[in-house]
Image (tube, rainbow, N blue to C red):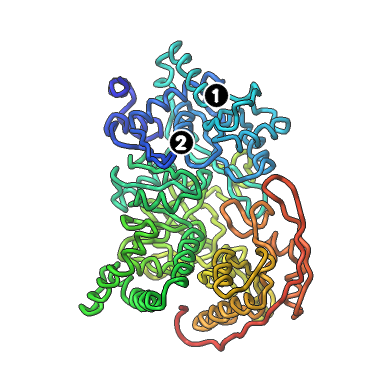
């Protein structure tokens, strides 16, 4: 019956808004799976017909709660089918979904709820409901919280709360009174209407609401669909925060544009297993995810037997030498091809399978710069990993590396429709059909970022090379010079160090100074495994980070990175001369990282100014006491006497960076 409903719907054939795309998929590929979710260990699918029918019911339900065109509807939780369908329903009403980071504390959410005047929230579970109840006094517009998962909420009786099933029932009653409401509302949506609003990570200040239209998002998704020849047979795993524009583009916008299948993991802790279950064909991961995956691989290899470790090392040496060339279709000798094929049977194939990447046809990494060693590692395995460049304000896709022209030091040429210009100060300017409409209620910031000439100021420094590919150096505000005038690009240095599995995070300092120094976070899992195999007892992160043996381990990593930096004449002066291992992990809850885990460099420099001064002053130790926030809202303090170490540096060598 639902199929007949969509077949007779008067929705236009033109698919230039999200509601029209949804209804078109229900007509064209109604029986194909649109969204899968793993629940209690079993994958369950919703077809396009079922998704469209649910979106219709939810839209009626939201209308019954007073949602009208132009209003903001917050959505907060992990990737869940009903949350995605709620966004579709809101868009069909002409309302504006505002995805929020599910791991944000209540006080962080308060700013978004107040700024966007949120009246209705679609929340995943009890955790998110509790945050909304905590904020009700400070967010006077909030009137209704709809929850998807009822576990733990049986005895909640607050009149502001409504279960998702109750919302559907209210929608059915609304539809009975006005059955044509949904079609009228959906047809009234125009391409230049606001489709969604995403808040920036707030690296340098308060987050800004980025207003994106249906036309902007759909245009960028179609451009990459054409470029990569994406079809409705792709499988995608949605495992990153839905509030991040990157995840939203890949698992929501492109879902509705291309009509493929999006798979939702059972929980964040089961992503690795669920990825192997699904075997995605189209994959997206920021560098930190790829770093974590590589760390787990290297930990497992350290625990393997002697022969297996030797075989792995030999095969990876071969892969680094010829694997990327084979992937790019370049000429490789028959002997090396045969050896690589054998390595594929013994090492590369099983490794791709263990990573869940056996079926990957196209994989992207973005969000921040990726270290060239990490990038080459995945491509050498035969995984078609490519870099892309974009931002929330550009609907993600600005530059994408085309097949056969993938290089570790670029992010590719502009995608169709995009223009790039480099300002006199080295800042990258972008003009694109995917540009944002405005920063919500912030005309001054809008004018500053997007001038009257239509060029968006990205804040990134870089240049177009002779092949027309864009090279990103760093954030424009972070790129500087050492006291002797040498180039200082902290992100490049940090990525060099983060390639080592024992190092999780790095913050480099040196602008205006006579040398480079760094804070380092060890990877607790990797270093903990290393310590256990050596019988080194420890009582937690702070204790482990203070061990002399761990300092020697990290010193070796720093000096190896320095040797690599010495091969690049531009960055040879930026070798790390002194470092310390922080007594705590950098944490978004302590405002040291954004919710997308980008370093808040200026904040860290201010918060740990005593450590920065101690490094550059040449001190051997420094006492530090730091306040930390716990997940339940409590605060505590961590104190330690940190050891500050010198690292060996190397003379500059002629040649390219490793």
Dot 1 falls on a residue whose secondary structure is loop
Binning the other alpha carbons within 10 Å of mark 2 as few (below 14), some (14 to 19) or many (20 upward) gives many
Q: Is residue 464 visible?
A: no
Residue visible at 40% across and 62% down in the picture: 412
Say whether marks 1 and 2 touch (CB < 8 Å).
no
Mark 1 and mark 2: Cα distance apart in space: 17 Å
- The residue drawn where x is 44% and y is 49% is 432
Look at mark 2 in the image and give the residue it sits on. Answer: 84
Q: Residue furthest left?
A: 334
Foreground residue, 410 or 238? Answer: 238
- In the rendered image, residue 155, in percent from the top left (x then y), is placed at 63, 26
User: Please, what secondary structure does the residue beneath circle 2 have?
Assistant: helix
Disc assigned to residue 400: none
Q: Nearer the viewer, residue 426 or 580?
A: 580
Q: Nearer the viewer, residue 311 or 178?
A: 311
Q: Residue furthest top?
A: 177
Judge whether 168 appears above or below 486 on screen: above
Image quarter for residue 527?
bottom right
1 or 2: tag closer to the N-terminus: 1
Residue 577 in percent (x, y) is at 64, 80
Does 176 appear above or below 640? above
Residue 543 placement: quadrant = bottom right
Q: Residue at x 68, y 61 (%)?
A: 602
Q: Position of residue 171 (x, y in %)?
A: 47, 19
Tell us which disc is closer to us: 1 or 2: 2
* Left or right: 396, with 572 as reference point: left
Q: Is residue 469 above or below residue 454?
A: below
Q: Nearer the viewer, residue 526 or 9?
A: 526
Residue 71 position within the rendered picture, expressed as x and y whole percent measured from the top left: 56, 29
- Disc ID at residue 67: 1
């Amino acid at each position: 019956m639902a199929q007949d409903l969509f077949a007779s719907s008067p929705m236009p054939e033109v698919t230039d808004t999200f509601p029209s795309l949804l209804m078109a998929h229900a007509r064209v590929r109604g029986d194909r799976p649109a969204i899968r979710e793993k629940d209690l260990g079993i994958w369950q699918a919703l077809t396009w017909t079922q998704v469209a029918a649910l979106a219709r019911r939810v839209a009626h339900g939201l209308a019954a709660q007073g949602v009208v065109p132009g209003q903001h509807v917050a959505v907060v939780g992990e990737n869940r089918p009903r949350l995605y369908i709620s966004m579709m329903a809101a868009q069909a009403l002409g309302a504006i979904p505002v995805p929020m980071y599910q791991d944000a504390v209540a006080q962080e959410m308060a700013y978004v709820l107040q700024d966007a005047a949120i009246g209705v929230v679609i929340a995943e579970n009890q955790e998110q409901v509790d945050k909304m109840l905590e904020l009700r006094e400070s967010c006077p517009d909030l009137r209704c919280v709809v929850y998807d998962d009822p576990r733990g909420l049986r005895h909640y009786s607050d009149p502001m709360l409504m279960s998702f099933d109750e919302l559907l029932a209210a929608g059915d009653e609304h539809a009975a009174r006005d059955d044509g409401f949904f079609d009228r509302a959906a047809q009234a949506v125009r391409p230049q209407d606001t489709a969604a609003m995403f808040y920036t990570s707030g690296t340098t200040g308060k987050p800004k609401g980025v207003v994106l239209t249906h036309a902007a998002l759909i245009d960028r998704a179609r451009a990459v669909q054409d470029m990569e020849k994406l079809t409705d047979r792709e499988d995608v795993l949605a495992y990153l925060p839905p509030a991040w524009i990157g995840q939203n583009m890949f698992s929501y916008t492109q879902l509705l544009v291309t009509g493929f299948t999006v798979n939702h993991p059972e929980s964040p802790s089961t992503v690795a297993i669920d990825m192997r279950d699904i075997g995605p064909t189209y994959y997206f991961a920021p560098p930190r995810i790829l770093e974590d995956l590589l760390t787990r691989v290297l930990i497992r290899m350290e625990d393997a037997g002697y022969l297996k470790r030797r075989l792995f090392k030999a095969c990876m040496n071969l892969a680094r030498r010829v694997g990327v060339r084979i992937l790019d279709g370049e000429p490789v000798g028959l002997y090396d091809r045969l050896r690589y094929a054998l390595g594929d049977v013994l090492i590369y194939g099983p490794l791709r399978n263990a990573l869940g990447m056996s079926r990957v046809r196209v994989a992207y990494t973005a969000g921040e710069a990726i270290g060239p060693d990490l990038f080459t590692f995945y491509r050498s395995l035969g995984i078609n990993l490519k870099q892309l460049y974009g931002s929330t304000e550009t609907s993600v896709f600005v530059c994408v590396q085309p097949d056969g022209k993938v290089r570790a030091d670029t992010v590719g040429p502009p995608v169709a429709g995009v223009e790039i210009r480099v300002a006199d100060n080295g800042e990258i300017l972008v003009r694109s059909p995917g540009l944002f409409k405005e920063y919500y209620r912030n005309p001054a910031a809008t004018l500053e970022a997007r001038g009257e000439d239509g060029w968006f100021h990205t804040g990134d420094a870089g240049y177009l090379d002779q092949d027309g590919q864009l090279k990103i150096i760093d954030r424009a505000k972070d790129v500087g010079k050492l006291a002797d005038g040498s180039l200082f690009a902290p992100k490049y240095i940090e990525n060099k160090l983060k390639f080592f599995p024992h190092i999780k995070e790095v913050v480099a300092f040196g602008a205006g100074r006579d040398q480079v120094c760094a804070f380092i976070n060890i990877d607790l899992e990797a270093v903990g495994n290393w310590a256990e195999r050596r019988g080194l007892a420890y009582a937690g992160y702070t204790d482990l980070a203070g061990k002399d043996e761990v300092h020697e381990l990290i010193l070796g990593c720093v000096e190896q990175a320095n040797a690599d930096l010495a091969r690049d004449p531009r960055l040879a002066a930026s070798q790390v001369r002194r470092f310390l291992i922080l007594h705590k992990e950098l944490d978004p809850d302590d405002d040291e990282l954004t919710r997308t885990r980008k370093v808040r460099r200026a904040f860290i420099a201010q918060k740990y100014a005593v450590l920065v001064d101690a490094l550059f002053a040449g001190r051997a130790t420094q006492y530090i006491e730091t306040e930390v926030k716990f997940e339940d809202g409590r605060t505590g303090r961590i104190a330690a006497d940190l050891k500050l170490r010198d690292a060996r540096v190397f003379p500059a060598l002629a040649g390219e960076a490793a």
